[in-house]
Every structure is written in structure tokens, then in C-alpha cells.
Image (cartoon, rainbow, N blue to C red):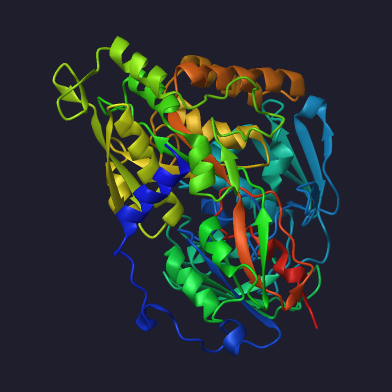
């Protein structure tokens, strides 16, 4: 698919469907952005909101949670540094014992002291089978968590889990509050208390998360005293709110961000990411579950055209969860656009074109539904481009939009324009995405993919600290996905932000698939300084 045809397909599909009126935008009110906020207030626009604010259920597991701290945190270069721990851990016993000395004098925002009991409580609760935390397999290596004294915690692992230190950035919850409630449904899930730089003052579901600076924060009281995350799921409305002065900053699709170029008082920041867009290929669907169809779609899509036409060059083709410029990427697994090869694969497998151009095999039309999240322009444009490329190969992808509430019940049989990605470690990129043991567990392994080689290599890679052995295992996984694709990967996306220039020295990190909730230039909002 050419860049011009991508733009034509998208324009034709969305023409007349989006109308922005004054009623669709919020008027500035107290604490809302440049138009009404003071010098010590900041408001940013994000695309999604969390299901819960409890770290016991997965909130903030990659760090930057604002309300909480982990034992460790990341600096601007994603290097681990101490947070609630006073120093990096002491690692002994061949990588199976991690000893953390805790920072003294730290208090939760309710004034109660932080101790080793809170660390033990947090990890043991997450690992409890009754806790609804979909990422708990990333802590599978933990054998036990031991309190040596009030300020010393020791983690005993079953095996040397290479990225374990990276998982200690997850936030610590207060035992004296969360330990007295139902972990899955108690009030702590929406009214959390932490040790972090900010205190949640209000969560208006679907509208905004409001925070105030924690004056007793152990790292020093933030200069930004009021911080608001406005939840604006529609990209166009987020851009309109930004133009009106209602926001200090927002994440935007690259093409929308380009419309802010050279506007006085604003600047654009671009962050490199591990954030990919892909199409799930449910194994339960007779079309997407067919290996030949998956292989054909993998070479039928024109990734380069998507990068140019949809991302405006702000990204790169994706052939799997690992970006092509990562040292973990397996060179030689790139799949160039090759429509003729796609047609040969389908012909050989018995999928023959009908009179309407759609293939058929044993009475089954090569047709399936592809969902994307409504209001998300990037997902919409990727879905339309994918469907157009698939059609040329004789496969019909019927594009539908909806909320996650509408999409989730259909994920077992229908394809979804999905996303993911984590820069911290390849285990986080791949285990929950591909291992058969988590198939269909929420948003884990949405394709319900099962491949023994991939399963075995995923386990091998996480159970050694030898980088050479890990690289060999992840190379084998990526090579297996060439012949037996679990998803059709499309692009890795750079995150683009437009911000007011009233704050100085803003920066970004290499970012995960996060939608601006904890990443973005506000990853360290507690350190922001006024420009004047």
C-alpha cells in the first residue's frame, strides 16, 4: 500500500465522522492549564485512564506512578537508582538472593512510617492467587520475601531471574491501609495512599485525575503544587483542548502534532519507544487461526508505507515486539512487503479467490472482524491500512470501532488492533504476549497463541543471568515467529508531545506502551522548574 493510498483510505473513512464544537471541549476552570492555572499548576492531556490506582492490581508496575515509590526507580537514561531503598540491592547466591536496605525516615502521605512490613505485604499480596493482578507472572521467580529488620528486606528467588531488579520499581502499598481491605475491590483501589511526590485529591472517572504536591515527600516538595491529568480519549478533542490553552501539554498522534509546528508558546518533544501496534490473530477463529493466513498477512502488509503515511515518519516498521534498533532484535527476521508471496502462500494452502475477490476454503470465506478503540486515530488508521493491504491478498478484514467494554467480549474470536511494549527487559515484552500459560488472561496473549518452542525459549530466557544465552533464546523466538506468526506486527511508534514553553528543561525517556499516563515529559513532573 502506498503512502498516498494510505492517506486516501483514511481520509475517505473518516470524512464527515468527526465534528468538534465548543460543547465538545471543557472550558478552563480552577487549576486547568495555562488559561486559568497559576504558576505552580500544570494540566496535561492523556489518552487513557487506569482501571485501578492500586499497585497491588498492577498500577504503576513500570514506575512513575506519582502517588507511590518503588524500592528502585529509573533515571532519564532508564538506569536503575535507589528510591525507597537506600542503595541498589546486594545480589548473592548466584543471583538468587537480593538484599535491600531501606531508606529511613520515609512516611506515607497519611503520616505513618514506611517499613519493611510494607514491602513484604506488597509482594506477598500481589503473588496471592486471590489477587487480580494480570502481571504477577513477572514475579514468578520469588520464593519468599523476608523482613530481616525494620529497614532490611531480602528476596529469595527460585531461580536467577535476570530482570528481577527491574521489577522492584513497582510501587509499595501501605499494609496498615490496604491490608485491612478487599484487595480487588476495596476503597484503596480508587483512593490510594503512598509515599510518592503527589497525593491524589480526586479521580473523576472518564474526566481527570487531580493531584497535589506531597509537602513531606522524602525527595523534596515539588515546585508544581497542583498537577492534573485530563483524560481525553479522542485525539482530535485533545488537540482542540491544547489549542484553546486548556492544557499545558498532551500526547498527540504525529500528524496532529505536526499542526502545532511553529505555534508561539509551544514546543514539541519526541520520545523513542518500544510501543508497537499489531493485529491479534485469534487461534479460535477459523480464518486467523490458519497458519497460512497468518503468514500471508505478515508479508502482505506494507509497514514502510504505514510509517510514512500514518506516523509521518515518527516510528519504524515492526516485525515483532522488539524494535529493529534494539540489541535484542534478531537481525534477518525483517519481512519486506511482498504481495505476490502472500498470494502464493494462500494459493498453496487452498484459499482460492471468489468472484468478489475474497478467498474461500472448504466453504469458509477468508473474512474476519477487526476492532479498534474508538477515538484513537492511530489505531483507526492502522486498522484501515491493514484492511486495505489484506484485501489485496484476498482477505477481508471488516473494521469496527468500539470501547474496550464492547471489544473485550469479542477478543476470543475477533481480531483487535492492539499495542504493547516495554523497554526495561525483553521478558516484559514477550512472556505475557506469547506464552500459552497466560493465553486469554485479560489482555495477555490476546491471540491465544501456543507454540512449544516459543514457550520453552521464553522460560529459558527468564531463568538465566547469562546475556549470551538470553540473546540466543530471544533470537530463536523471533525466528520461530517468522514461520508461525502469533500477530501481525505493523509499526513501532515514536510518542510525540506538544507542551507549553512555560516549563524549562523538559525531557523524555525511552518509553513503554503507556499512552502518556506515567511516561511523557511529565515522567518527572516533581522536578519541573518554571521557565521564568
Residue sitting at x 62%, y 19%: 332
Residue sitting at x 78%, y 66%: 106
The foreground one among 450 and 389 is 389
The foreground one among 353 and 43 is 353
Residue sitting at x 17%, y 23%: 354
* Residue 498, placed above or below residue 139: below
Q: Position of residue 443 (x, y in %)?
A: 43, 42
Count of marks, rendered view: 0
**In this rendering, would 79 be left or right of 333?**
right
Q: Is residue 225 visible?
A: yes
Q: Position of residue 419 (x, y in %)?
A: 48, 44
Q: Which quarter of the image is occupied by the N terminus?
A: top left
The foreground one among 304 and 334 is 304
The foreground one among 529 and 307 is 307
* Residue 246, placed above or below residue 183: below
* Residue 395, placed above or below residue 218: above
Q: Is residue 231 visible?
A: no
The answer to which quarter of the image holds residue 5 is top left
The answer to which quarter of the image holds residue 200 is bottom right
| Direction top: furthest residue | 348
**In this rendering, would 100 be left or right of 451?**
right
Amino acid at each position: 500500500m502506498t503512502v498516498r493510498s494510505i492517506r486516501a483510505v483514511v481520509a475517505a473513512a473518516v470524512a464527515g465522522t468527526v465534528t468538534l464544537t465548543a460543547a465538545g471541549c471543557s472550558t478552563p476552570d480552577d487549576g486547568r492549564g495555562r488559561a486559568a492555572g497559576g504558576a505552580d499548576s500544570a494540566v496535561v492531556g492523556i489518552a487513557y485512564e487506569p482501571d485501578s490506582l492500586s499497585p497491588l492490581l498492577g498500577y504503576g508496575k513500570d514506575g512513575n506512578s506519582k502517588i507511590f515509590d518503588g524500592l528502585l526507580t529509573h533515571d532519564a537514561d532508564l538506569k536503575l537508582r535507589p528510591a525507597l531503598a537506600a542503595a541498589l540491592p546486594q545480589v548473592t547466591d548466584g543471583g538468587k538472593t537480593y538484599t535491600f536496605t531501606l531508606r529511613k525516615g520515609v512516611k506515607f502521605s497519611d503520616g505513618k512510617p514506611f517499613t519493611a512490613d510494607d514491602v513484604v505485604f506488597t509482594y506477598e499480596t500481589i503473588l496471592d492467587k486471590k489477587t487480580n493482578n494480570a502481571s504477577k507472572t513477572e514475579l514468578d521467580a520469588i520464593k519468599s520475601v523476608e523482613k530481616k529488620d525494620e529497614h532490611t528486606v531480602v528476596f529469595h528467588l527460585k531461580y536467577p531471574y535476570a530482570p528481577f531488579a527491574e521489577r522492584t520499581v513497582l510501587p509499595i502499598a501501605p499494609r496498615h491501609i490496604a491490608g485491612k481491605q478487599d484487595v480487588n475491590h476495596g476503597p484503596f483501589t480508587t483512593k490510594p495512599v503512598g509515599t510518592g511526590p503527589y497525593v491524589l485529591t480526586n479521580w473523576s472517572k472518564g474526566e481527570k485525575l487531580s493531584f497535589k504536591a506531597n509537602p513531606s515527600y522524602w525527595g523534596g516538595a515539588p515546585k508544581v503544587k497542583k498537577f492534573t491529568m485530563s483524560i481525553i480519549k479522542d485525539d482530535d478533542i485533545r488537540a482542540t483542548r491544547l489549542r484553546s490553552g486548556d492544557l499545558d501539554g498532551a500526547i498527540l498522534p504525529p500528524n496532529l502534532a505536526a499542526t502545532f509546528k511553529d505555534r508561539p508558546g509551544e514546543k514539541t518533544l519526541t520520545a523513542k519507544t518500544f510501543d508497537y501496534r499489531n493485529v491479534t490473530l485469534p487461534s479460535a477463529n477459523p480464518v486467523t487461526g490458519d497458519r497460512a493466513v497468518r503468514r500471508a498477512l505478515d508479508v502482505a502488509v506494507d509497514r514502510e508505507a504505514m510509517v510514512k503515511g500514518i506516523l509521518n515518519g515518527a516510528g519504524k516498521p515492526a516485525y515483532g515486539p522488539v524494535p529493529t534498533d534494539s540489541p535484542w532484535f534478531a537481525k534477518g527476521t525483517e519481512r519486506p512487503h511482498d504481495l505476490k508471496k502472500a498470494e502464493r502462500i494462500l494459493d498453496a494452502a487452498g484459499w482460492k479467490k471468489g468472484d468478489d475477490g475474497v478467498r474461500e476454503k472448504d466453504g469458509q470465506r477468508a473474512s474476519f472482524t477487526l476492532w479498534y478503540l474508538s477515538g484513537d486515530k492511530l489505531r483507526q488508521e492502522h486498522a484501515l491500512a491493514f484492511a486495505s493491504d489484506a484485501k489485496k491478498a484476498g482477505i477481508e478484514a471488516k473494521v469496527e470501532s468500539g470501547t474496550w467494554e464492547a471489544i473485550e467480549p469479542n477478543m476470543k474470536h475477533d481480531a483487535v488492533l492492539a499495542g504493547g511494549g516495554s523497554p526495561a527487559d525483553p521478558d516484559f515484552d514477550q512472556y505475557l504476549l506469547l506464552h500459552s500459560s497466560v493465553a486469554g488472561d485479560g489482555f495477555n496473549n490476546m491471540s491465544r497463541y501456543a507454540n512449544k518452542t516459543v514457550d520453552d525459549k521464553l522460560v529459558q530466557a527468564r531463568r538465566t543471568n547469562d546475556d549470551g544465552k538470553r540473546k540466543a533464546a530471544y533470537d530463536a523466538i523471533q525466528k520461530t515467529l517468522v514461520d508461525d506468526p502469533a500477530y501481525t506486527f505493523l509499526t513501532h511508534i515514536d510518542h510525540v508531545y506538544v507542551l507549553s514553553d512555560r516549563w524549562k528543561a523538559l525531557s523524555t525517556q525511552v518509553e513503554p506502551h503507556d499512552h502518556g499516563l506515567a511516561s511523557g515529559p511529565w515522567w518527572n513532573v516533581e522536578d519541573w522548574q518554571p521557565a521564568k
